[in-house]
Amino acid sequence: MSTAKRPISLALAALGGQGGGVVSGWLTAVARLEGYIVQATSVPGVAQRTGATLYYLEFFAEADLPGDGRRPVLALMPSPGDVDIVVATELVEAGRALQRGLVTPDRTTLIASTHRAYTISEKSALGDGRTDSGPILVEAGRISRELVTLDMAALAERQGTVISSVILGAVAGSGCLPFKLESFRQAIRDGGIAVATNLAAFDAAAEAVHKRAAPVEERKGTSEIQDVPQSLRDEIHRNFPESAWPTLEHGVARVVDYQDEAYGAQYLARILPFVRIDANTDGKSTLTGVVARALALWMTSEDTIRVAQLKTRTGRLAGIRSHVRAAPQQIVEVREFLKPRIQEICGTLPARLGRWLMRSPARQRWVAVFAGERAVRTTSIGGYLFLRGIAGLRRWRRATLRFQLDNEEIVAWLDAVHSAAQTDYAVAVELAECQRLVRGYGDTYERGLHNFTRILRATRPIIGRADAAATIARWRTAALADERGDLLAKELAVPGQS
């Protein structure tokens, strides 16, 4: 056998549900149609983001076989520095391939989707735990011989299909395999599953990659947020700087959806004092913007009423059907898994009653009957009406214990930020940013609020120090990195820091 001939190697890194096995099967069929010997293997990865699997294929042309009957020995796994084509169906999977050394500048074509499927650690981080995509793309361009990118998920969504046919189209369009486009199409036809849809998505991806132009999502909407009542939009434009309008309109739309228009007016009234403070500084409206964003989040905290409202929102079931790509005649069943605690149940009750129950362990045991894990089928009449009934309590939300407790915390925070701004603008901005700690619901919310309260309490003695703002920022970073508060406790324990 001539040493000049070697197999073509391809590694495909795909997430669970993306059809990596289907793509591997199609590639195997294409190779056989083209007169190639092919071997395909797969190795499941850790159960992260529904599981990641590495598929590895090697191709060898039958025309290159020696006449003495010998056949090539094909590898079962990719070796660093020895892979011709790497396909990553999500950007972080491309980063993992780079880390493993599967991509090299002398031989590897890297085909990567630019969309993200966030990891558990990214989604569960207290702050913004998302991986920065920029460095991955820069490194991919530097390390690979050729980099081909497109948003495979967006293209699949527009074509109304799953991503597998888009992956195949990207491989075919790149020209990195010596196979004719018609052989790829024939493999899809021979598969016999959703042929028309898969062919359309395949052709769209192949054309996009061939032109080396990633498909661009069509931008919809206007410059104004449509869910803002006109009276509140007029107030924003009349009393607030133009640089803050987008944030304020998003904030108003959120709080009005959460409660009502009067709540939106209260939101704007709470921000107005910070506009006056910014007017006397550099005119950048930094504090106004930070407070506007943070206040909108806190004024729409996820109580039981909000959770029920979101889970029964008009169009949610249609969105779920679209996401799972259910056919019109298919039945989709939705089960909501809830775990209300005693605190959430009491928080939904009128404030006096909720406080009375929470003051006594014996009385809390009465409430415990309704707490604990439960599954509610919102596609049934009973399950849907149950959650709609809870969502309907919105009109009485202001009288609930949870709303009043939240309101007390919000007022204390706004007072602290406003007071700090009188002497140290930077400290006021950092205190406003600390609202990021208060998020989620249940234990996560309580731990975040506890850490926030500790920082607020520790801030008072350091007001006036030159490093006060930097110290608060460091405390916030520590609290965001560890929701239990251990890192924050170490920072607060540093002599002279608290």
Image: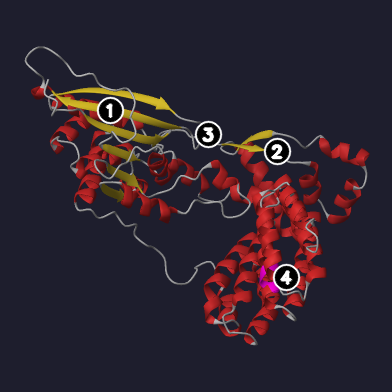
Residue 302 position, x and y percent, is 67, 53
Question: Label 3 sits on what residue type?
Answer: Glu
Mark 3 touches mark 4? (CB < 8 Å): no
For label 3, the SS is loop
Measure the alpha-carbon separation of dots 3 and 4: 53 Å
Mark 2 and mark 1 lie on one chain; the one further toward the N terminus is 1
Question: Mark 2 or 3, which is nearer the eye?
Answer: 2
Position of 235 compared to 304: left or right?
left
Which residue position holds label 2?
A: 339
Q: Specify whether 302 is left or right of 164.
A: right
- Please report contact status of discs 4 and 1: CB closer than 8 Å, yes or no: no
Q: Give the range drawn in magenta.
A: 427-431
Residue ID for mark 4: 468
Give residue 57's mark. 1
Q: How crowded is mark 3: few (under 14 residues within 10 Å), some or many (20 or more)?
A: few
Q: Quadrant of the rendered structure where residue 431 is?
A: bottom right
Three-letter code for the amino acid on which mark 2 is drawn: Lys
Q: Mark 3 points at which residue?
A: 333
Q: Which residue is drawn at 71% across and 71% down?
A: 467
Marks 3 and 1, how far apart at CA: 38 Å
**Which residue is drawn at the image coordinates 48% and 34% (left, top)?**
50
Q: How crowded is mark 4: few (under 14 residues within 10 Å), some or many (20 or more)?
A: many
Instruction: Quarter of the image for the N terminus: give it.
Output: top left
